[in-house]
Amino acid sequence: MDVRIFRALKLKISMNLKISKAAQLYFALTELGSKELSFTTAYRIKRNIDHLKAIGEKYSEEMKAEYKKLLPVKEEYQDAEIKYYSAMADASIYKKWDESGEEEELDLKVLSFENEDIKFSARQIESLEPILTVES
């Protein structure tokens, strides 16, 4: 491994990130945190989750409140209705946060998944992009 790359993997990066992007990153990392990964990768994910936790929890609270506002009062709901209103609440809160332009200064660990056996969706890659590094 190139020494420069090795040093880059050890670094944490300080960045200003829109809170909407930070929330996306939190949820992407939380999902990855449940996967079987190497100790180093799991540690870096955990540390990043710890740094983003307050943002993720605030986003979740706002999304739950928005969901309750959107959900019509009924005795029983179908799964499709629940998913629909959850997606509507998520989109509404994301748009509100994104349009606010508010940023948070974060110290995050860079991640490399070169040695991990894991598949990513395009959405996960987009969410993780600020902290991903590629080994060459």
Image: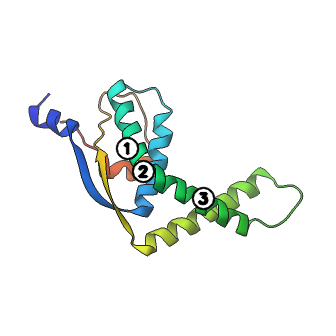
For residue 135, above or below residue 15? above
Assign a secondary structure to mark 3: helix
The residue labelled by disc 3 is 61
What's the amino acid at mark 2?
Answer: Leu
Task: Give the image location of residue 129, x and y in percent.
Answer: 33, 51
Foreground residue, 74 or 62? 62
- In the rendered structure, which disc, 3 or 2, sits on the residue that comes first in sequence? 2
Return the x and y of residue 88 as percentages of the image width and height: 63, 65
Mark number, residue 48: 1
83 horizontally vs 7: left or right = right
Q: Secondary structure at mark 1?
A: helix
| Quadrant in which the N terminus is drawn | top left
Crowding around mark 3 (Cα neighbors within 10 Å: few <14, some 14 to 19, many 20+) is: few
Q: Using the rendered view, name the quadrant where residue 41 is placed.
A: top left
Q: Amino acid at mark 3?
A: Glu
Label 1 crowd bin: few (<14), some (14–19), many (20+), radius 10 Å: many
* Residue 112 location (% of width, % of height): 29, 37
